[in-house]
Amino acid sequence: MRTLIRNFFICVVVTIISASVILEDYERNRNSLLEEENVHALGGKLQLDSEEAILNKILKQLKEAEVDESFKNPNRFNFSKHYFTYRDEISNSKVYQIIKRMPKGGALHVHGTLMLGADYLLNLTYQDHLYTCYTDDVFELQFSDAIPQRHCPVKWTLLTELRRVSDDVKAFDAAIKQHFTIYSEAQEDIDIIWERFEKACYVIKSLILYRPVREKFLYDSLKRFYNDNVMYIELRSGLHSLYELDGTQHERMYMVKLYQNITKKFKQDYPDFIGIKLIVTKHRGSDIEQIRQTLDFARQIKREVPEMFAGFDLVGQEDKGKPLVDFLPALLEAKEEINFYFHCGETNWFGMATDENLVDAVLLGSKRIGHGYALTKHPTLMATVYKKGIAVEVNVLSNAVLSLVHDVRNHPLAVFLALDLPVVLSSDDPGVWGAEPLAHDFYISFVGVASKHADLRTLKQLALNSIKYSALDNNEKERSL
Ligand SMILES: [Zn+2]
């Protein structure tokens, strides 16, 4: 009996010990798997110096508190709601306040006419000589020293005069502002929001094609990005003709020189600003001859002002526009001379011309991919993008506002970060949805999309990537880093 009890006792002890060994082993394997994922994620291999490590500790505590609070109270988690419902609360976040002050490197995906918000644009309408053709359906603007001759279903009137005779200036200005933004608290269908977006682009462009206004607009845009700690910008622009008060139209090259001169002046005022380069754009609705002409113009800029030139791209709603294959002969002719930075895969569809634009962008040697939202559905391409170092320009807020994703936790950036794809964060058109130049995109990506474990190293790597994958030459990159 005694032997029986002893054997039973030994058996229990052995079972307990081996169970705890199994548990320990399991825990070790579990930790090492998680650690492996962390190391392989974007920024996971970066070493922080002692000062950065102190900041990281603070940042991690603040971020974890924010994420845990949302995990416990998902109804209060802002990033699953429409951006416009929480935009104005962002500045209360301590994580955001740190990110705002953080050096962000470059913004590589920004459209030149959409960098400043509706309040700023409204102020421009207080300038003299601004005529408007204004009905319920039409809103046209033109600076002129005489009544414009273009067709108007009512009559051209000075905007200052319309404002003066309005009963309620506040209401009048609010109505004008509506034309400069796509602000709406309702979650809208993708086609409706794109229609409003393209209308706003048209109105804004008409306001800032007047040469003196464009000079001011550009300088103030650089200032606003600089204040957000963005030191370099690659601007996408159609580089349309600017005009003077007497109706004189400048050649398109004039705009390139204007960009160059204003940037020079800005760098004199703020010597640590690195500069800007231009990506010449053409609308996807164009025909192949128009694409050829724009590519010729791109060649001319590259020849005459090489320091300002980055490359070529196509713009407009991708699902509605022509796919890259439609322009293949023209693009193949230019491929060796002009760097491409194609918007592609900006869609929720799979197996359509839009997401398959990604194939053509890679085959045409695109230096970076604008959006690449559909990339996770093309694993072979994703592997190529990784291997060849084709950076993906991710614009989370743009994708949310333009109705590709309603809860940013589902944004493919989460996968890109986990796989350490060459990602750069940018902001696309922050003015038209009233976002900060780049800080909102960084904050929402960091807290709303990236893993809770992603820390300062992720942010630092994103800033470093924006220099590494820019169109700067090697000397400029070294200086910038
Ligand atoms: Zn864009």
Image: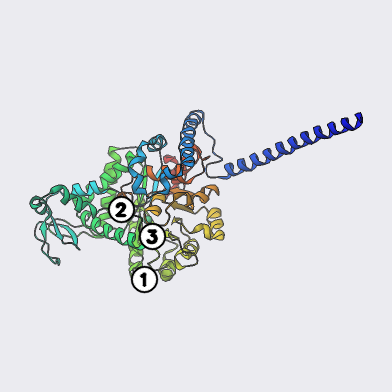
Helix, strand or loop status at disc 1: helix
324 to the left or right of 415: left
Q: Which residue is mark 3?
A: 313
Identified by mark 1, the residue type is Ile
Q: Quadrant of ligand 1?
A: bottom left
422 to the left or right of 311: right
Residue placed at 69% from the left, 40% from the top? 26
- Quarter of the rendering occupied by the C terminus: top left
Seen from the viewer's position, the closer of residues 325 and 75 is 75
Front: mark 3 or 2: 2
Task: Tell me the CA gap for discs 1 and 2.
Answer: 36 Å
Seen from the viewer's position, the closer of residues 223 and 8 is 8
- Quarter of the rendering occupied by the N terminus: top right
Q: Which residue is mark 2?
A: 184
The mark nearer the N terminus, 1 or 3, is: 1
Q: Which residue is mark 1?
A: 288
The mark nearer the N terminus, 1 or 2, is: 2
Task: Tell me the CA gap for discs 1 and 3.
Answer: 14 Å
Indicate if the residue with disc 2 has its beta carbon within 8 Å of ligand 1. Answer: no
Q: Residue 438's x, y, as percent?
A: 37, 44
